[in-house]
Amino acid sequence: MKSATSLVVLCVLVFFVMTHAKVENRKKKDSIVAFLNGYCADAPLCKDSLGKKDFPYCQCLDVAFPRGHYCYCFNHRI
């Protein structure tokens, strides 16, 4: 009888904790995209242009119209 009562109390406590606990979602932004004038070869590196230390892995993509390039920077390897 003592083990059955302990089991019921344990289940009630677990239920209480699960329903009343607050979980914070601190999801960090994992990428940033910027459109810059000029072409990739004419401009400094995307990482330097954006000035973001949190996004060390960058790729550059030239576009014909309008003249410029997109910088895609990520905080993880692609």
Image (spheres, helix red, strand yellow):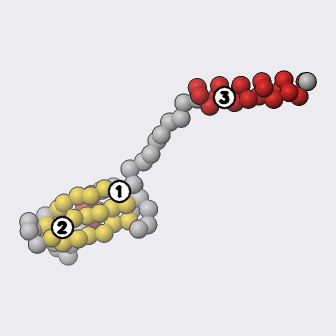
Q: To which residue does mark 2 refer?
A: 69
Is 76 placed above or below 40 here? Answer: above
Is 42 placed above or below 5 here? Answer: below
Nearer to the camera, 48 or 30: 30
The residue lying at 44 percent from left, 62 percent from top is 76
Local secondary structure at mark 3: helix
Q: To which residue does mark 3 refer?
A: 15
Mark 1 vs mark 3, CA separation in Å: 38 Å
The residue lying at 66 percent from left, 28 percent from top is 15
State if disc 2 and disc 1 touch (CB < 8 Å). no
Mark 3 vs mark 2, CA separation in Å: 53 Å
Rendering coords of residue 56 (x, y %): 39, 62
The residue lying at 42 percent from left, 48 percent from top is 28
Nearer to the camera, 32 or 54: 32
Instruction: Examine the image and state in which quarter residue 6 appears.
Output: top right
Q: To which residue does mark 1 refer?
A: 31
Tell me how many marks there are.
3
Mark in the foreground, 3 or 2:
3
Rendering coords of residue 45 (x, y %): 27, 68
Rate crowding at label 1 as few (under 14), some (14 to 19) or many (20 or more) other CA atoms within 10 Å.
Answer: some
Q: Amino acid at mark 3?
A: Phe
